[in-house]
Image (cartoon, rainbow, N blue to C red):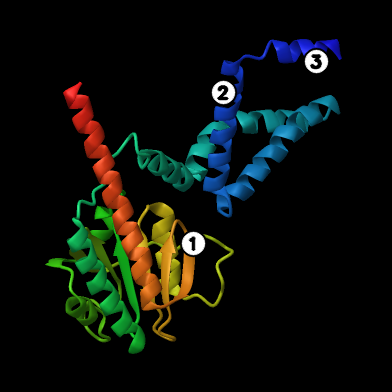
């Protein structure tokens, strides 16, 4: 009992902060790999870490030798196996406020006009049961995705968006990528999600929307071709059965959040200049 009391006496504020930071980092890492292939691989690695000393204790020399050599080359194997997850983690770190600035710089009136055109187009497509996939770029650049489609470079308008997704037109079968208030490209190809827990009822359009939001911080608006249902994908999650009012609220909140982040960055920059 005295040893325990003495141990707590020797713990300083710095030690507590150190443990909290480590716990927070491990929590964030867990959130990044949760419900992905990496989660199962981590479980396998934990089994190997337990089996290696256990085989030595039981004097299973051949098994112990194999496990030790496996762990020796395991670091290189981890870099290869976890390449998508490592890239996702680094992109997540790169999107933090102290390492990057937002690309969205739209004034209040322009935000309302942009969102209004988007919602009008999505509402019309939904009523006509015309499938659509609209990707809204945020901080993570989507140049690789844009290169897979046809560059547009036009200002957002409901008419242009509707015409792009009209069936049997050259660009209807693919995604539209939007940056700020411009349509960058149409007919773009998106990566499909690897999440095995996605509902079997969801088709390729929805899986592609979830896939791109797993690899970037983009937001995707989806219109189902079969039902006309409006959905929004963000951070690998899907919100379904939205009406135009709810969609407008989500888009306005998203654009305004990005605008506020940009203003905060500019204020910090000006403050540092003054100092």
Please give the residue where the numbered disc 1 appears in the rendered image: 237
Distance from disc 3 to disc 2, alpha carbons, whole Å, reads: 20 Å
Give the x, y percent position of residue 25: 54, 34
Q: Secondary structure at mark 3?
A: helix
| 203 lies above or below 79 | below
Q: Quick one: label 3, few (<14), some, or many (20+) residues within 10 Å?
A: few
Residue beneath disc 2: 17
What element does badge 1 sit on? strand
Quarter of the N terminus within the rendering: top right
Residue at position x 30%, y 45% in the image: 261
Give the distance between the C-alpha atoms of the residues marked 3 and 1, in whole angstroms: 45 Å
Residue 46 lies left or right of residue 29; in this view the side is right
Ranked by sequence position, the earlier of labels 3 and 1 is 3
**Image height check: is 111 above or below 57?**
below
**Residue, far left:** 154
Checking the image for residue 144, the label placed there is none
Q: Residue 67, how many percent across, how many down?
A: 69, 33
**Is 81 or 134 nearer to us in this picture?**
134
Q: Residue at x 22, y 38 (%)?
A: 266
Please name the residue that numbered disc 3 is placed on.
4
Q: Is residue 133 above or below residue 102?
A: below
The quadrant in which residue 118 appears is: bottom left
Number of disc labels: 3
Q: Is residue 147 visible?
A: no
Image spot of residue 112 (x, y percent): 23, 66
Which residue is located at x 66 percent, y 14 percent? 11
Packing grade of label 2 (10 A; few <14, some 14-19, many >=20) is: few
Front disc: 3 or 1: 3
């Amino acid at each position: 009992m005295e040893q325990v009391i003495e141990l707590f006496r020797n713990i300083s504020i710095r030690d507590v902060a150190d443990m909290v930071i480590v716990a927070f980092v491990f929590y964030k890492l867990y959130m990044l790999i949760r419900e992905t292939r990496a989660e199962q691989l981590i479980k396998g690695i934990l089994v190997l870490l337990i089996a290696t000393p256990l085989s030595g204790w039981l004097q299973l020399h051949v098994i112990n030798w194999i496990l030790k050599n496996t762990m020796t080359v395991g670091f290189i194997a981890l870099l290869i196996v976890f390449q998508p997850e490592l890239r996702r983690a680094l992109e997540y770190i790169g999107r933090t406020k102290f390492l990057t600035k937002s690309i969205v710089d739209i004034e209040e009136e322009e935000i309302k006009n942009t969102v209004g055109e988007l919602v009008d187009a999505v509402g019309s497509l939904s009523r006509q049961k015309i499938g659509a996939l609209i990707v809204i770029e945020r901080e993570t650049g989507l140049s690789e995705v844009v290169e897979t489609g046809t560059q547009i470079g036009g200002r957002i308008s409901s008419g242009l968006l509707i015409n792009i997704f009209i069936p049997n037109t050259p660009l209807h079968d693919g995604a539209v990528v939007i940056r700020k208030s411009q349509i960058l490209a149409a007919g773009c190809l998106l990566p499909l999600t690897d999440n095995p827990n996605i509902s079997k009822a969801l088709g390729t359009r929805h899986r592609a929307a979830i896939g791109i939001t797993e690899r970037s911080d983009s937001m995707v608006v989806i219109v189902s071709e079969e039902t006309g249902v409006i959905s929004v994908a963000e951070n690998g999650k899907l919100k379904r059965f939205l009406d135009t009012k709810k969609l407008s609220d989500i888009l306005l909140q998203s654009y305004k959040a990005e605008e506020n982040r940009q203003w905060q960055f500019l204020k910090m920059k000006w403050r540092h200049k003054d100092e």
